[in-house]
Amino acid sequence: MTDTVSEIFDRFDNLHDWYVDGILTESEGGSGIPDIFILRAHDGQRRATVTFEGVTRLGFEAGGLLNIVNSLEAVRPGTEAYAKAEALLSRSAHGERRARYVAYLYSTLGVELAVEFDRLRID
């Protein structure tokens, strides 16, 4: 990944004030165990599909029909944000392997989530 995760999120203003309108999981190679997490969002003019690959853990809190993002950020170990993400991720039963990155979606309204992953793309 040439750009850092933070740089990729920055190009989309960390999805600030975007509406989450789709959440889905998939399994690469048909293993049956989800390892891809897809988040779809829009800001009324643009649309983004955020695909996290190599997902090892995923945790959600709250959420409903209306979910507005405050910020989507990469978080690092040793920070308060990472501790908050880890609290959600600790509820995810997904094996012993840990991925390279952790991102946290802070909510203005609705869902907050943490995802641990190896690769990222936004289309």
Image (spheres, rainbow, N blue to C red):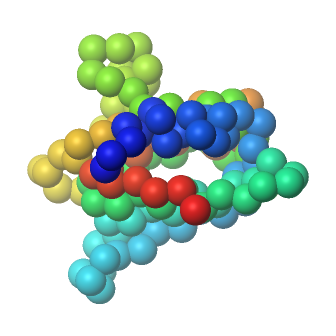
Task: Identify the image quadrant of residue 87.
Answer: top left
Residue drawn 12% across the image and 50% down it: 96
User: Where on the picture, by quarter, is residue 39?
Assistant: bottom right
Q: Is residue 95 or residue 15 the one in the foreground?
A: 15
Residue 49, quarter of picture: bottom right
Q: Position of residue 40 (x, y in %)?
A: 64, 60
On screen, 34 above or below 61? below
Give percent across and percent down for residue 33: 29, 73
Q: Residue furthest right?
A: 44
Image point 46% across, 68% down: which residue? 25
**Residue at image coords 45%, 33%:** 6
Residue 20 x %, y %: 70, 52
Q: Is residue 72 visible?
A: no
**Left or right side of 83 for 107:** right
Q: Is residue 78 visible?
A: yes
Q: Quadrant of the C terminus?
A: bottom right
Measured from the top left, where is residue 54 in percent x and y?
A: 28, 60
Q: Nearer the viewer, residue 46 or 94?
A: 46
Give the residue furthest to the front.
Answer: 2
Looking at this view, is 13 or 25 the one in front?
Answer: 13
Q: Is residue 81 left or right of residue 40?
A: left
Outermost residue, left side: 96
Q: Is residue 98 above or below residue 74?
A: below
Q: Is residue 122 above or below residue 43?
A: below
| Residue at the (27%, 22%) spot, across then down | 77
Drawn side of residue 17 relative to residue 72, left or right: right
Total labels drawn: 0
The residue lying toward the viewer, choosing from 24 and 61, is 24
From the viewer's perspective, tell me whether residue 67 is left or right of residue 31.
Answer: right
Instruction: Give the vertical position of 26 relative to 86 (above or below).
Output: below
